[in-house]
Amino acid sequence: MLSKNEWDPLKTVIVGTATDARIPLMDTSLRLVNYANEKYTYNIPNGVYPQAVIDEANEDLDIFVSHLRANGVVVLRPDSTYMPEYYNFCPRDTVLVHDDLILATPNPIRARANEWHSLVKQLSKFDKIKVKMINRDDSLYNSNCVGDPDVLALNETEPAFDAANILRDNDNLYYLVSNSGNKKGAEYLQELVPDKKVWPIQGIYSYMHLDSTITLLREGLMLLNPARIKSIKQLPKPLQSWDVIWCPEPIEIGHHPSFCNASKWINMNLFSINPNLVVIEEHQINLRSELEKHKIDCMMLPMRHARTLGGCFHCVTLDIERIHEK
């Protein structure tokens, strides 16, 4: 069975690569989905990331891969022959794996529409990939979102969402309605999994994905971002009875000058190898202390360009198989 939650013992995973990572030329989709918080975009660079960033990010990914393999995990990497328009750093954004579904999601950024192609060879070994094609014409995007976090970048003309808008809890899927996922996307996903329940989460955080706001550590225990979650009642009903670890203030790791694609909260973007072992950014000693109180061990590894490239350990992975114990 394919992975269906965020915590069961890991068997097989795809880990991304920073090779050829780039910021595409600005268009409506990139401007409004990625940079709605920026009043002006003339300072945003485009083109391939600095080589030092790519090299150091790949060094950190290779260290991560070595530790995964040492823990008995089968690690796959994106197809090196696929040249991305954006990058192959965050496979979590591009494909949703859940139970018997492998879905190439209808990412709202045009430059990411075909990013799933880098994962076809790896995923075809497990099941057929379902692909949702959309138009991404200008009617999908709402320019009123610029500078206003209460206005979302996506209209409801067609379903659009990144896979990283979703967290998996067995028969429950939690879906963040945000600049990278509209309500039609949640409705489409529900049609694909009629025997599961898709729970939209709204009004919490507009600027992208769910996995630096909520982390599901094991059944009944979650890590929450206190800067975004102010009340448990904001969460879907199944999560309201879970125990909570409030994430401590992240320890700043910085970013490459002029390149910042994530807030400091990317440092809570951890990845579970099993219910008792997670991988977190090596400087997050306060988070480690909180997790260890709940008997969760932490593998402390470098991810120097998590903020620069916009992804930490959950973002740069796509778990395909986990060993389900029930």
Image: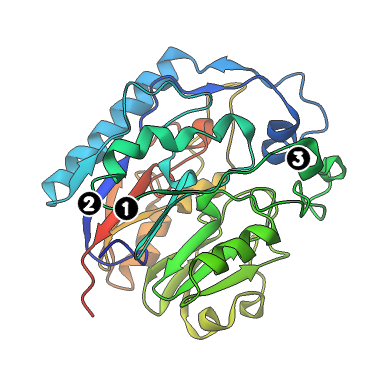
The answer to whether residue 315 is visible is yes
Three-letter amino acid code at the position of disc 3: Asn
Q: N-terminal of the two: label 1 or label 2?
A: 2
Q: Which residue is mark 2?
A: 12
Three-letter amino acid code at the position of disc 1: Asp
- Residue 200 is left or right of residue 241, and the answer is right
Measured as percent of width and height from the top left, residue 63 is found at: 24, 35
> Where does the N terminus fall, quadrant-wise?
bottom left
Residue 314 vs 48, above or below: the answer is below
Disc 1: CA contacts within 10 A as few (<14), some (14-19) or many (>=20): many
Of the numbered discs in the image, which one, if any, rests on residue 319?
1
Judge by depth and name the residue closer to the eye, 139 or 284.
Answer: 139
Measured as percent of width and height from the top left, residue 90 is found at: 44, 39
Measured as percent of width and height from the top left, residue 35 is found at: 71, 35
Residue 287 occupies quadrant: bottom left
The answer to whether residue 248 is visible is no
Disc 2: CA contacts within 10 A as few (<14), some (14-19) or many (>=20): many
Spatial CA distance of label 1 from label 2 is 6 Å
Identify the residue at horizontal 36%, vertical 67% (top origin).
5
